[in-house]
Image (cartoon, grey):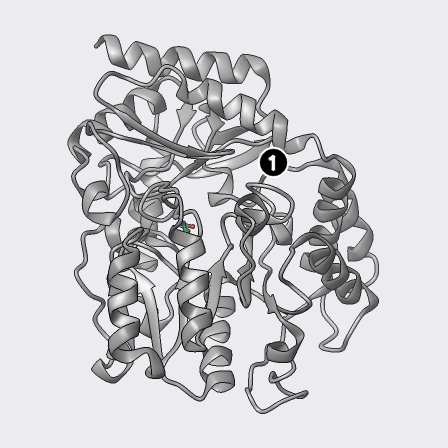
Amino acid sequence: MNTAQSEALFTRAKDVIPGGVNSPVRAFRGVGGTPRFIASGDGAHILDVDGNEYIDYVCSWGPLILGHRPKVVIDAIAAVLELGTSFGAPTGREVELAELIIDAVPSVEMVRLVNSGTEACMSAIRLARGFTGRELTLKFEGCYHGHVDSLLVKAGSGVATLSLPDTAGVPCGFSETTIALPFNDLDAVERVFRDQGDRLACVIVEPVAGNMGCIPPEPGFLEGLRRVTERYGALLIFDEVMTGFRLSRGGAQELFGIKPDLTTLGKIIGGGLPLAAYGGRAEIMQKIAPAGPVYQAGTLSGNPVAVSAGVAMLRYLESHRDVYDTLEKATAEVTARAPEGVRVNRVGSMATFFFRPGPVRNYEEAKGSDTAVFSRFFHHLLERGVYFPPSQFEAFFVSTAHRPQDIAYTAAAIQEFSKN
Ligand code: HOZ
């Protein structure tokens, strides 16, 4: 495979952009080799600058549930460009997007739009502290809630990919406000609440973890978090940046039937443009400025271009309720021929192949995966034109644009790896 143009761009990039990329996982450090510089995308396919074509299972890390450049979204963006790109003043579309989110996500009664999942999670925990008058946050090892100072403690995603124990630049005072426990360990959560329940403002969790690879909640785990937070007056925050509108229209909370107090959203709700949100019970959301005393703001928040893309995407999902069944079947086919000794974790259209036997229920078990074999698997697929996330500690995604022939080709390429 000729990758000369990607290599040349990467060399240039490293002189002007730290590590050559604008988000660490993209640098291929977890798998080795040269990151592909992408020229274009169409449906389920991407083309790199050397003209190599791939079936894309990164899907921009989740947002592209309809694939690249879906007509409904592109038309909406084209239409709004005739009107303006940013006003710094409210528009009717923001109200429409808020109504669509509230209609779909069971626990959300009010919502505030921001620009990224990081902003959404940072704002949600600030709100939880403001609402409860408490300071501590409980999170789970290997979960990633954006690069919020206090949430980078034992974080997943790029932090896990680069095996960074901690992040430089975070004052102790910030990380000390966070307690990190193993995912799926309800006993540990109960112990911490027994000791410090009156100091805990919130528990933040990816209801299906996606940033240490895909790890589903064990039966009873989310229910237990709901119970214990209610008992001690702490807020339960579901980080549904990845799972929102992905696992079902109402996200993981609809799938598992649990109502958190606050929810963070991103990725799909922006239709492939930078947009995120946090929302929840009205009583809590009314504490945000200017309605209440918890400050949060943003010049480009609710900008018309991203909001129009988001509205088009959510309207499409509202009127095509069969999307989730289609994705379930397609993703099950991709994972059906996993190599021997490989553990597949999958919920709906997000999944991960872990190169180890036995269950993967938390970050420790995820770290037990043979990342050298994962790297070989990744490059085996890449060489055959299948683009998976370049990290063991990320989920892959399927879109409605993946056609039966894409899925069949991918499943065969995976099976071929097993034979090598
Ligand atoms: N942390 C995100 C994936 N879980 C974003 C990765 C990227 O855009 O490079």
Pinpoint residue 192: horizontal percent, then vertical percent: 26, 71
Residue 308, above or below 6: below
User: Residue at (76%, 61%) from the top-left corner?
Assistant: 99
Q: Which residue is mark 1?
A: 68
Which residue is outermost to the bottom?
293
Pinpoint residue 318: horizontal percent, then vertical percent: 75, 43
Pinpoint residue 156: horizontal percent, then vertical percent: 30, 54
Residue 170, above or below 11: below
The amino acid sitting under disc 1 is His
The residue carrying pointer 1 sits among few (fewer than 14), some (14 to 19) or many (20 or more) residues within 10 Å by Cα, namely many
User: Residue at (48%, 65%) from the top-left corner?
Assistant: 237
User: Residue at (40%, 57%) from the top-left corner?
Assistant: 224
| 141 displayed left or right of 226 | left
Picture quadrant of residue 194: bottom left
User: Residue at (55%, 22%) from the top-left corner?
Assistant: 329
Residue nearest the observer in this picture, 329 or 112: 329
Pinpoint residue 331: horizontal percent, then vertical percent: 49, 25
Residue 170 in view of the camera = no
Residue 221, above or below 116: above
Residue 183 in view of the camera = yes
Q: Secondary structure at mark 1?
A: loop
Q: Quadrant of the C terminus?
A: top left
Residue nearest the observer in this picture, 365 or 46: 365
